Image (spheres, helix red, strand yellow):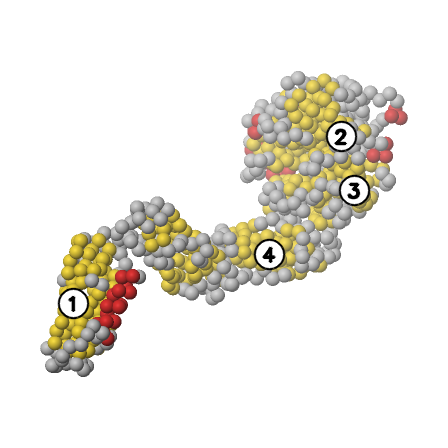
Amino acid sequence: MKKLSLVLSFLTLVICGCGGSSKTVTADFTFAAGPATVSVMNGGAPQAVSVAVSALNGFTGTVSIAVSGLPTGVTATPATLSLSAGQIGQFMLTAASAAVSSSAGTLTFTATSGSLSHTATTTLAVTAGNTTATLSDTSFDFGGNLLGSTVAKSVVTVTNTGASDLSLAPTLTGDASYAIVPTGSCGATLAAGMTCNEIVSYTPTVASGGTAQTATLNLGLGDVDAATSDTVALTAMSAAVPVGTVTATNNPQVALYSVTLPFPGSMTVNFGTDTTYGRSTWSESTSVNGGTINMLVAGMLPTTTYHMQAAIVLANGVTATDTDHTFATKAALVPVPATITTTPGATPQPGVEEITIITGQKGVAVTDLQGGVLWSYLAPAGEEIDGAKLLPNGHWLITVADGQTANFLHLPFPPNNVIAVREIDLAGNIVRELSMADLNLELAAAGYSLTLDQFHHDITPLPNGHWIVLTSTEKMFNNLPGYPGVTNVLGDVIIDIDENLRPVWVWSEFDHLDINRHPYQFPDWTHTNAVIYSPSDGNLIISMRHQNWVIKVAYNDGAGNGDILWHLGYQGDFKLVGGTDPIDWQYAQHYPYLFSANSSGIFKLGLMDNGDDRVGCVAASACPYSTIPVFQIDEGAKTATLLQNQKLPPNLYSFFGGNTELLDNGDIEYDLAGTANPTLGSDIFEVTPGATPTNVWHLHTNGVYAYRGYRIPSLYPGVQW
């Protein structure tokens, strides 16, 4: 700045003629150039040399000015100037990156008007750049954006790789949707060895259509040679905020919410009885431009009008919301006549209750903790659903059949009866299905001499995507002890079904158990009612109600030989600790549940002990009764220690069905499927753990049986309601 001021002062003196007086014979002009010395950098920013003309003795002509003495690689812009007296002009000197460097040289500026001519000189030095710099990228794509939304991104990182300060003067040209964001961006100077980011925002106001909206960011790097890249090409696309549609589905409590996203992204639907919403679905996404997301919205009470709104998140972080939509639900497919009691001051585990109804209108229902039905699936006419599990993909896995003993007792089948395992979506649409007829064909093709009758009681999805299905079959025996003649025995077969719905591991109880051990309700020999996966060792834990046993089988993730590793229960392999043998073992039990993260070595296992044929009662009037035992299993020492064993009163004796589970808050939930409290129905309790459990929450079904009851977080995996 000081040098420029001196130059301007000098030129002003020349123009005004303030330096003194002279005698004039003819009209003439004076001419000057400055500064006296100028330095340009190879590939660097242009440098200015100013020239000025002033009149002498009434000079009024036009002066043409040219420059000579430019070294190779140095150019002057413009090549010539034309000035009138009293005017100042500028030549911009630029050195190419390949210009010859020199410490000093002379430029001559020649001013000519007719026969009059004057010259002025400036010393010129051409130097190499005094630092170096690199850019992380020369292009940046913002992706897609929605009109009116601003997305700010760090589009480039600048690194000063030299030993001197680097100057920056960023500018933007192109589409007006782009703007430099000063906060957080590079400053005017970047010290040697340092980096900085340049941040640009993109706020489209007009849809781009099929042509990208572009701009160029010029970082204006100084003190570097011309070969250094200092521009970044910016591109983006834009579209209007999409508007979704809401339509009815086959399920009167489930809506289909569809949104077509112009760019890759995801959406979640918020819904509730007013525009504060309150509940949310999970997130589903599309990875393509113009992809449609179809979200099944479930979790709404029957005969109620709901508001719902999609929350959209594009892959680049842009967010938007759809307009509000309304949807009116209708009556539930499976009603659940229920009475709910919550203990004052107690807080139940959040979530919803999954219930399998096996009398009345049979099917699967999910209720809120006040007993309102939020979702249900009606079993086909005459059939029942025992096993039902929510899959990681948001679908349901269910068994549909006539009941385990239907074939065995030669019961009449309903017209068009269905015996199958199904994967269904929330609307009830069948995604995949394996019928018993197809499974028998697959088994025959694989060389198994088995004919299966029913799917029943349970189905277990595995981490690898396979399904463990529980099936029944019959086998004829002659002259069993106590059973002269031919006896038709009903037993169970457990099968691993792969992703292609083909059997890949088959385990028949007839191959591994003693047909002459039948403590309860023979010839319904084993009446297996649950299979759970043991994640610690890849084996299976199986509940056999009519054997009064829970066993572990060597499955080994499909590579096991099927050996029974142990039997838990009366006359089994474990010593009972903390209880009285035989009365405190489980009898006619249902559904083992892991109460610890590990499932081998030393671990905890809970049960629903129905107690139907309990051994060891002092008097008949003292039995039967049901309990909820939690065992600590030590597989090495072969001990089963009763950590707690809630003995239920006579009115809560459950003669069949049920299950138990450990909730996330540490409480224990159990379903007593068949009770008389206070009327025939089922009782589902959430209780505190410990020697004297207290009730937290209680659901009683009036006149219908709930075969199983589970607390699940919501109807969407990973979402807690």
Among the two numbered marks 3 and 2 on one chain, the one whose residue lies closer to the N terminus: 3
Say what secondary structure mark 3 lies in: loop
- Tell me: 6 left or right of 572: left
Q: Label 1 to label 2, Cα distance in Å?
A: 104 Å
How dense is the environment of label 2, judged by Cα within 10 Å: few (below 14), some, or many (20 and up)? few
Q: Secondary structure at mark 4?
A: strand
Image-based side of 681 in relation to 510, left or right: right
Q: Sequence-wise, which precedes: disc 1 or disc 4? A: 1
Q: Residue at label 3?
A: 345
Nearest to viewer (mark 4 / mark 3): 3
Residue type for callout 4: Ala
CA–CA distance in space, label 4 to label 2? 44 Å
Q: Which residue is mark 2?
A: 690
Q: Position of residue 480 (x, y in %)?
A: 74, 19
Q: Is 238 placed above or below 634 here?
A: below
Q: Which residue is mark 1?
A: 120
